Amino acid sequence: MSEIKLKELIKNFGGNSIAVDNLSEVFPDGEFVCLLGPSGCGKTTTLRMIAGLETPDSGEILHGDKIFFSSKTGELVKTENRNLGLMFQSYALWPHMTVYKNIIFGLDMQKKTSEEKEKRYLELEKLFHLENFRDRYPSELSGGQQQRVALARMLAIKPSLLLLDEPLSNLDSSLRLEMRSELKRLHQSIGCTIIFVTHDQMEAMTLATLIAVMNNGKIEQIDKPMEIYNNPKSLFVAKFVGSPQMNIINTDKDKELALCLSNKLNIQKNSVKNFGVRPESIKMVKNNEGDINAIIETIQPTGADWIIGLNIFNKSLFLISSDHPIAKENESVGVIFKSEGCHSFDSQDLRIHKN
Amino acid sequence: MFTSNSTRQNSLLVSLKIKLSKLLLQPTFLIGVILVIILSYLVIAPIVSIFSNSVSLTMMDAMLSGGKDGEFTYKYVDRVFTSSISEKIFWIPLKNSLTVSFFATLIALTLGLILASLVTSTNIFGRKYLGFLLIIPYMLPSQAMATAWLTMFKNRKISGPQGMLESFGITPPDWLAYGPLPISICMALSYFPFAFLLFSSALGKIDIQLEEVASTFGAKTKAIWLKIILPLLIPTTMSVLLLTVARTLGTFATPYILGTPAKYTLLSTSLYSSVRSNDSGVVAVIAIVLSLIGVMLLLVDIWVVRKWQRFVTVGGKGIKRQPSKLGIFRMPTTFFAWVIFLIAALGPFIVLALSTLMREPGNFSFSNFGLAYWTGVNVPGMDQPGIFTSPEVITALKNSFLIAGSASIICGILGLLIGYAVVRLPGTLISSFLRQISFLPYLMPGLAFAAAYLSLFAISRGPIPALYGSISLLILVMVVTYLPYASRSGISAMMQVGPEPEEAGMVLGAGFWRRIISILAPLQKSALIIAIILPFITGMKELSLVVMLVTPGTELLTTQSIRFLDFGYTQLANATILIIGVVVMISVLILNRVTKTNLASGLGG
Ligand SMILES: Nc1ncnc2c1ncn2[C@@H]1O[C@H](COP(=O)(O)OP(=O)(O)OP(=O)(O)O)[C@@H](O)[C@H]1O
Ligand SMILES: [Mg+2]
């Protein structure tokens, strides 16, 4: 159908690092894919290449069986003819056009009749709660309203593929929550493929049906959100997803702790370079009753949970728990590691699978 | 072997195909290439031609002294630097130019600094109005000040109607009427608004927290100024200094009007007489010297700016400094500022206007006033029609509008196109080439540039016809000279808009021209208006650039006023200058109204 296929895509801007490095991936039809990764890892570049705003150095981009770009055959479809929706981080609404003009621009380009335009506009107006804004200019709208106009403008032409580049990053937190559910509902009702760029892992976890974690111009792992969380393929993915971050224990630096974990997980210690322990997989018990003893360094209540800083043989770890802490700061407690949230990584930073 | 060869060929073809389709989908590249070709000819050709002129024998000299037309020769270099007339045509004018520039710059700088400090930072009376009023001299053509001076202080040494003072029975001495003193003063009064603008904006940019910190240590206002504000103004001062020197060196009208009667020649007027006597080799050499001085000043400026970079204060909050109370100095300083306004802006206007309204200078009886010089009825002792009926004035008015108008429209559009190509083709050769080449004319003083165009377009070359004596030549030279400003503002306007609005259009299916028309053009409307009106204003008062290119029939208002002066028709000259002043002021008002931009920021360049 209309999946997006990237084949050996390379883009180099001429600096010493490659923006997108030999990327091959398939984004299946109808999925809500989040491209997640740290700043500068090539998310925007990937998106812009799919949209045709940037030309790859080599590789292929296919949408269904339509070739958008191929360095093999020299094919290159103009952005104008790709029929996709792209939303910019800054929205890029045209300040000299009213909300109405902005939204029907794409229909104008398709030479639609005024009845068709009016009909589509009314639909979108209802969908995005834009009643009464028809003749306003973008500068007369709030951030959230601007964003809804940008979404409506993009959807007016009924694109088969939506590309969104950090569309929520300019909003305050409550509006962001609201827009998240709006986007999710939108995806369910329209059913088209969405590729969504973000560096906020919470956003990715809550919205996506598939998360693609990017690092240094490559996709390290693409999977369902919980799969990414529970079975990270690499140390990078494990560290990037989850908050507070996964605790990383280096087998060379923190020997005692590493020994304890390797015993607990029943794994050969020399094959492991790092252990990773999710904060919610650490449980506090009474002194001397756990796998190992720890000193409580800090206690931070977040409302629903407590984030507790522990010190075990001079290594700081964080745990998160919804139970009231059983001891005070500077007191000693026992600690139990739950094996579901404990991972081990080899010298290539790849996860070692448990048997 | 054979297969690998053919795949290589194939992949070459494929990459060529990609490049081609990229080009076609991005006409920006094509625009860039066309601009490169046009600008190369318009900017580089004149420079090349002037260098070649300086070392090749002219036809005239070839006939006189034997030798071949166009032969390589040091004759003109020798003539300018070492011959018996070198004193007269180069060394004395050089010394005079430097003297006058030095004093004019000194006065302009001091006035600018004092007035900017008073207006931005003290409770001087009328500071709101002074901010605008003190810029007015900048809007007057530079000959306004000079002719007003002449109208006032002229003595019997030259013909034409009496000077105003003389008609009261006071004969001004020669040193007051002509030569270095009045030239320096007039130039200073014409150019101080430039210093005023730059200092005002620099003072506005200084983060007042820097001053507040000092005052928490107990520093008094005076100490803050001496220890903090003035040192922070050093880089601005250096820039103002160098740019004002450059401007004064290139000025033609003032020395021509006030220096000629006393045989006081500057480089600019010496260049002009060489043009008049058709000595193109000498013209080229002097023009090169003027350009080299310009380049040198610019390099020094760049160096200074770089050296003082650490003085650049970042992130001023835009909070206005509380005006300091001047106490007993409030009256005297107010008086001083308004007197400067009176002398530099209002004075020339009144003097010029009065001179055109009085039949006989200095006679203030009611019956002596009238519109004779304007209507041409009952003009005493003159065989000329009045301003309203003079065919010369009407032609000049038409030409001025036509030339400055078309030049500024072309310039504005060209500037935005260059901006578009430069910003949208980042990192390419085209982008940096366009950026550099459109800046080149900035290095050459108008006079030198005009000299280059004169030699380039005197005869037809290849497909380009001889343009000398045509309106198009004047438009062309104006466009190229103002290009640095136009392209600079075009580039910054394009930078501000960014690629996203256009990309959003692309995604929604808008092709190149559609995007330009529906998205880019409306977004750049006010930038375009500014980019057109500013060169128009400059073009209306332009003299040095066009004075050697005009021919009978292509005179502009500015050059026509000089012709009137040459013939001793002072009143007609003054009236013409007044017309220019009024046109310029109206344009400025329109500019303010239409774009709501600050005039100050626009004229700052
Ligand atoms: N137009 C450009 N010219 C040169 N380098 C670029 C350009 N655009 C991106 N890059 C570089 O390519 C790399 C990837 O950039 P990209 O914008 O795709 O990152 P990103 O993942 O979107 O980051 P962010 O989360 O900060 O938006 C970066 O190192 C960036 O500096
Ligand atoms: Mg990005």
Image (cartoon, coloured by chain):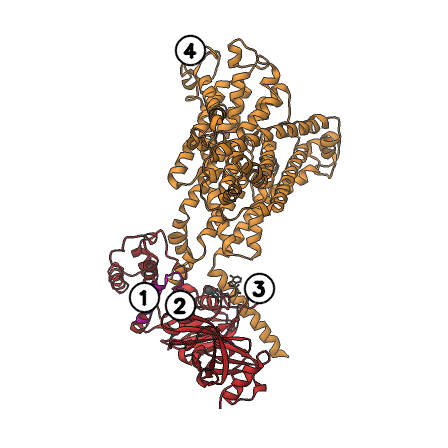
Q: Quadrant of the N terminus of chain B?
A: bottom right
Q: Mark 3 sits on what residue?
A: A14
**How would you rate the neighbour count of disc 1 (Cα within 10 Å): few for under 14, some for 14-19, many for 20 or more?**
few
Q: Of discs 2 and 1, which sits in the foreground?
A: 1
**How would you rate the neighbour count of disc 3 (Cα within 10 Å): few for under 14, some for 14-19, many for 20 or more?**
few
| Coordinates of residue B399 in the picture (x, y in percent) | 47, 31
**How would you rate the neighbour count of disc 4 (Cα within 10 Å): few for under 14, some for 14-19, many for 20 or more?**
some
- Front-lying residue, B357 or B468: B357
Name the kind of residue labelled 1 in the image.
Glu
Left or right of A129 on screen, residue A167: right
Q: Kindly identify which numbered label has been placed on residue A178.
A: 1
* Range drawn in magenta: A166-185
Q: Mark 2 sits on what residue?
A: A163
Asked whether A171 falls inside the magenta stretch, the response is yes
**Chain to which mark 1 belongs:** A
Of callouts 2 and 3, the N-terminal one: 3
Vertical comparison of B155 with B593: above or below: above
The span from disc 3 to disc 4 (Cα, nearest Å) is 78 Å
Left or right of B386 on screen, residue B217: right
Q: Of discs 3 and 4, which sits in the foreground?
A: 3
Q: Of discs 2 and 4, which sits in the foreground?
A: 2
